[in-house]
Image (cartoon, helix red, strand yellow):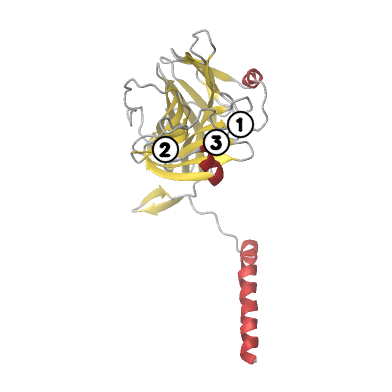
């Protein structure tokens, strides 16, 4: 009898410990925030951080596109095959028309609209930013300052934002004569301490494509990870799972319609954390990737070069995507002073 009582008492005490300890630990022994740096071989390096998911912040309300476009300052996009604008609120390419493609075979029919701003019918856009710890970062509502009024194949545009804490963020946009954008994340650290940041890019769209997904033409989420094309992601799979994660060196990911593609392309030499996700409340699908964490020391800067393709899928041979031929390579820190205030 005593053995049974002791066993019951032990079970009760174990249950109290299992149930009560998390509350006690959280209340009186909270976990400290992990450090963003560590010392290895006498050098300060960034520590691995939990991966933050860059959100698109797409609202559910649908309003007139022209009214939405008028609400924020913009930089025009003008190329032989594209027309539209970059939204300075959030640094998004969210207004894009394919001027050489039409809704029907009639050349007088309206041109194809690929991107639309959040809050408008057919919201679809590409966004850019940083995640990190211990530093004030630009967000989806940040209003950037532009170096020019129009992005063309011969005139790149630099967006700048100063967090007033010692860090200056810049995004350089360039575009070719077809459908390829070059996007360079820049951060200049003029603060007293080092900051750890991770650049990200995303493409977000509300609702799946109206085009059918067939055996001969994949429509939906698509990507190339570690050199292998992945056609196994469907709208229904992403909606059911909520999120799917991928690790890759280089590659690309995005969404494909029957004739059109929007894809984000990291530096092909960098290791990325990528994902497809679905927001059930807004019915928004998102493809995104985060570049490696970079530690930016005081009076240094860091740059990360990537690309965005937004246009028609054409069978003509295309030039290969450059890897590190842009002004600075992935994650490399250089001397400060190239960015404005």
Task: Determine the image quadrant of residue 249.
Answer: top left
Tags 1 and 2 touching, CB below 8 Å: no
Q: Position of residue 262 (x, y in %)?
A: 46, 28
Q: CA distance from mark 1 to mark 3?
A: 20 Å
Between residues 7 and 92, which one lies in front from this camera angle? Answer: 7
Provide the residue designation for mark 3.
Answer: 285
Callout 3: SS: strand
Q: Earlier in the sequence, mark 1 or mark 2?
A: 1
Q: Is residue 302 visible?
A: no
Provide the residue designation for mark 2.
Answer: 231
Callout 1: SS: loop
Single out the residue that lies furthest toward the front.
215
Q: Nearer the viewer, mark 1 or mark 2?
A: 2
Between residues 230 and 2, which one lies in front from this camera angle? Answer: 230
Q: Position of residue 62 (x, y in %)?
A: 66, 27
Image point (36%, 31%), residue name = 328
The crowd level at tag 2 (other Cα within 10 Å; few <14, some 14-19, many 20+) is: few
Task: Determine the image quadrant of residue 117.
Answer: top right
Q: Which mark is residue 141?
A: 1
Callout 2: SS: loop
Q: CA distance from mark 2 to mark 3?
A: 16 Å
Q: Nearer the viewer, mark 2 or mark 3?
A: 2
Image point (40%, 18%), residue name = 178
The crowd level at tag 3 (other Cα within 10 Å; few <14, some 14-19, many 20+) is: many
Q: Position of residue 93 (x, y in %)?
A: 52, 25
Q: CA distance from mark 1 to mark 2?
A: 34 Å
Tags 2 and 3 touching, CB below 8 Å: no
Q: Earlier in the sequence, mark 1 or mark 3?
A: 1
Task: Determine the image quadrant of residue 324.
Answer: top left
Q: Position of residue 238 (x, y in %)?
A: 52, 41
């Amino acid at each position: 009898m005593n053995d049974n009582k002791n066993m019951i008492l032990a079970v009760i005490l174990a249950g109290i410990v299992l149930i009560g300890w998390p509350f006690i630990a959280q209340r009186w022994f909270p976990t400290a925030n992990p450090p963003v740096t560590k010392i290895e071989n006498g050098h300060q390096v960034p520590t691995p951080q939990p991966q933050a998911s860059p959100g698109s912040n797409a609202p559910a309300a649908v309003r007139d596109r022209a009214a939405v476009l008028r609400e924020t300052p913009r930089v025009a996009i003008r190329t032989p095959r594209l027309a539209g604008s970059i939204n300075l609120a959030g640094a998004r390419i969210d207004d894009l028309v394919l001027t050489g493609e039409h809704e029907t075979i009639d050349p007088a029919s309206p041109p194809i609209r690929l991107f639309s701003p959040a809050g408008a019918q057919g919201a679809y856009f590409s966004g850019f930013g940083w995640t990190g710890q211990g530093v004030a970062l630009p967000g989806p509502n940040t209003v950037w300052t532009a170096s020019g009024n129009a992005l063309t194949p011969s005139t790149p545009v630099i967006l700048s934002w100063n967090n007033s804490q010692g860090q200056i963020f810049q995004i350089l946009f360039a575009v070719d004569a077809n459908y390829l954008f070059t996007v360079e994340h820049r951060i200049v650290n003029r603060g007293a301490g080092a900051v750890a940041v991770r650049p990200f890019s995303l493409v977000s769209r509300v609702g799946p494509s109206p085009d059918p997904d067939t055996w001969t033409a994949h429509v939906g989420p698509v990507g190339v990870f570690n050199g292998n094309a992945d056609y196994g992601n469907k709208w229904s799979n992403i909606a059911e799972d909520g999120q799917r994660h991928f690790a890759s060196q280089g590659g690309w990911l995005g969404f494909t319609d029957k004739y059109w593609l929007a894809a984000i392309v990291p530096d092909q030499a960098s290791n990325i954390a990528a994902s497809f996700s679905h927001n059930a409340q807004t019915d928004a699908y998102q493809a995104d990737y985060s570049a490696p964490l970079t530690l930016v020391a005081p009076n240094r800067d860091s740059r990360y070069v990537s690309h965005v393709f937004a246009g028609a899928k054409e069978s003509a041979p295309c030039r290969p995507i450059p890897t590190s031929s842009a002004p600075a390579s992935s994650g490399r820190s250089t001397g400060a002073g190239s960015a404005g205030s």
